[in-house]
């Protein structure tokens, strides 16, 4: 019991706010990870992981039967669920993918604004553990396991300052990366030979609203979450 109480006190403890210069430097590092193509090829896996997790959560909440998640080395992913091929549940499931990184980033920013960086890291670890049991391919297992190991290492061995910086870095990558992922979706759909299988295209077929409307909705949500998140963190 003493161990459990000690663990809870650690998780529920608040950390001091990062100095403004350190916070801006961390956000700048996140921007580099998102904007530099060579680095984005790696950091985009974080966005894909959360994107597919969003599909999975939405499918479960809407009563669909989750079949599994696959993550690929080219940063693409696939979440399989079974249920009605049309209707609100399917729309909700498709809608959740591109907005999940933005909403998660916004929630993370809110937790950080209250000083709960340690709690945020352990919540991330719990989410990764839940996702691990739904992964259905080897690269996906490796990707989730590496992510979990990184979060666990910082949570268990990192100092309070390191934990706060890491939590802010992940939060900023989610908020900024979500916007870039939507812009990439728009660019892909603008090509004459796009395959029409994107979330926006599938939503267009289900709702009879043009795919560009859904891309615009994703972008507005992403930009709004980034702006609100910056406000929560005292950076806007």
Image (tube, rainbow, N blue to C red):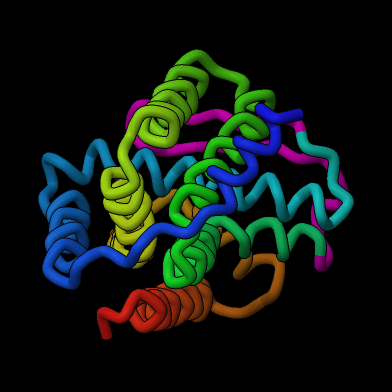
In the picture provided, is 227 more to the left or to the right than 49? Answer: left
**Residue for point 51% across, 19% down:** 141
Above-or-below relation of 52 to 72: below
Which residue range is magenta in the image? 67-88
The x and y percentages for residue 28 are 14, 62
The x and y percentages for residue 47 are 41, 48
In the picture provided, is 211 more to the left or to the right than 90? Answer: left
Above-or-below relation of 15 to 113: above
Residue 166 seen in this snapshot = yes
Who is closer to the viewer here, 62 or 229? 229
Above-or-below relation of 211 to 189: below
Residue 197 seen in this snapshot = no
The x and y percentages for residue 53 are 59, 45
The x and y percentages for residue 14 are 47, 59
Query: Would residue 70 be counted in the magenta stretch?
Result: yes
In the picture provided, is 89 more to the left or to the right than 233? Answer: right
Who is closer to the viewer here, 111 or 28? 111
**Residue for point 43% across, 29% down:** 156
Quadrant where the C terminus lies? bottom left
Quarter residue 23 falls in: bottom left
Quadrant where the N terminus lies? top right
């Amino acid at each position: 019991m003493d161990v459990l109480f000690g663990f809870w006190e650690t998780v529920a403890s608040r950390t001091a706010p990062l100095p403004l210069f350190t916070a801006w430097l961390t956000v700048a590092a996140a921007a580099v990870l998102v904007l530099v193509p060579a680095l984005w090829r790696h950091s985009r896996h974080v966005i894909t992981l959360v994107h597919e997790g969003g599909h999975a959560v939405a499918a479960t909440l809407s009563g669909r039967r989750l079949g599994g998640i696959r993550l690929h080395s080219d940063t693409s992913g696939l979440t399989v669920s079974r249920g009605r091929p049309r209707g609100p549940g399917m729309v909700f499931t498709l809608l959740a993918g591109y907005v999940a990184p933005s909403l998660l980033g916004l929630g993370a920013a809110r937790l950080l604004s209250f000083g709960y960086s340690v709690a945020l890291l352990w919540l991330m670890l719990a989410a990764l553990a839940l996702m691990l049991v739904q992964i259905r391919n080897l690269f996906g297992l490796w990707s989730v396991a590496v992510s979990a190991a990184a979060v666990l290492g910082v949570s268990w061995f990192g100092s309070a300052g390191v934990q706060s910086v890491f939590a802010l870095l992940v939060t900023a990558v989610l908020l900024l990366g979500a916007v870039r992922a939507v812009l990439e979706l728009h660019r892909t759909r603008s090509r004459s030979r796009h395959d029409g299988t994107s979330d926006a295209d599938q939503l267009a077929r289900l709702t009879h609203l043009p795919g560009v409307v859904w891309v615009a909705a994703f972008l507005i949500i992403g930009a709004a979450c980034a702006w609100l998140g910056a406000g929560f963190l005292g950076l806007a």
